[in-house]
Image (cartoon, rainbow, N blue to C red):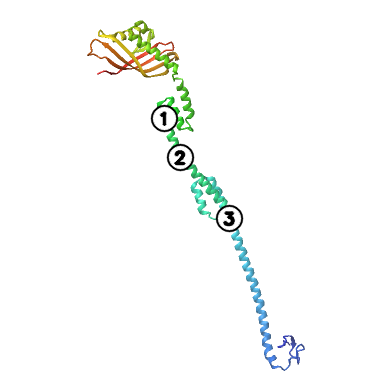
Amino acid sequence: MLIHCPECNHEVSDKAATCPNCGIQIAGNPDINASQTPKRRKSQGEASTAKKSNRWTIILFCFLFLIATAAGGSYYMYCQMQQHDEEEAYEQAIESHNEEELQRFLAHYGTAPREHRDSVKALLQRMRDNERNREEQEQLDAIDSTDYALARQLNTVEAYEKYMRMHPKSKHLEDAKDRIIELSKYNATTEDIDFARSVCRRFFQAINSHNEEHLLSTVQPVMTQFLNRNSATNADVVTFMEKLYKPDVTNLNFRIIDPFNVKRVEGDDDIMLLKAVFTVTLNIDRTDNTKERFSTYGVTAEITPDGLISKFNLKKIQAEE
């Protein structure tokens, strides 16, 4: 039987007298006989155990590899599913334009790609800015509508011009401009004012001079209205003058005072008339000093293009106490 030399560990027959390699005694050596047989058995057991250990190591490694591969595959599939879910949620949130949906995405997908989260945050900010701008615009529109309603109520060129200065971007601008154009055709020019004042002055000068002929030259033969009487005639005008000259009156003096306001108005047959609104004072010289000597009247007169008064009304404002 082959054994291992205790000195050099070379294999040698247990029958050999000495080790051919190192010369140590083999046959009859009690140390060799005592130690080699157990050692031989131990070496064979160790080899068998080593083989089994290696086999189990390989099996364990393969098992762990399979587990790691399965876990890696599962994690990969999980990540793929998470990515797919995140992309669907992102697209749904962006398309919804709903603040709650966008907030839900940010809360649930904290690990979403940065560009997705930044895009959702930017959309949220734009929506909030738009909502704030919408509320501010609603407030401005409410103020705009209130101011325009006031301008419509006044219905003057000045009111509309003031409104346009206050609201240069209003949706009512075109309507305001149209109304200014419409109203402007009723605005009296300086020539219109001078013309109307001249006719009214001649009317009162004729009364001051107690001149019937001159008085009737300033009025139409049949007036639309005179002292609230419709279709008044020249006789009605003369009667008015004569009533002013009572027996104790020695002199009358009507005088026009400013402001003398004139605007254009449409008369019958679409004829444009001049409407004058002004005040006159009346000084009366009379023999009876106990009676009225001074009074003030408001006058409204409409004048035709040929310089005749077609409508005339007089209202006392105050009298001397």
Q: CA distance from mark 2 to mark 3?
A: 44 Å
Seen from the viewer's position, the closer of residues 5 and 249 is 249
Q: Quadrant of residue 206?
A: top left
Badge 1 crowding class, 10 Å Cα cut-off, few under 14, some 14 to 19, many 20 or more, is few
Q: Secondary structure at mark 1?
A: helix
Please name the amino acid that badge 3 sits on.
Met
Please name the amino acid that badge 2 sits on.
Glu
Q: Is residue 266 visible?
A: no
> For residue 136, which numbered disc appears in the image?
2
Which mark is first along the chain, 2 or 1? Answer: 2
Residue 271 image point, x, y percent: 44, 14
Q: Is residue 22 above or below residue 151?
A: below
Q: CA distance from mark 1 to mark 2?
A: 20 Å
> For residue 81, which numbered disc appears in the image?
3
Which mark is first along the chain, 3 or 2? Answer: 3
Seen from the viewer's position, the closer of residues 129 and 314 is 314
Which mark is first along the chain, 1 or 3? Answer: 3
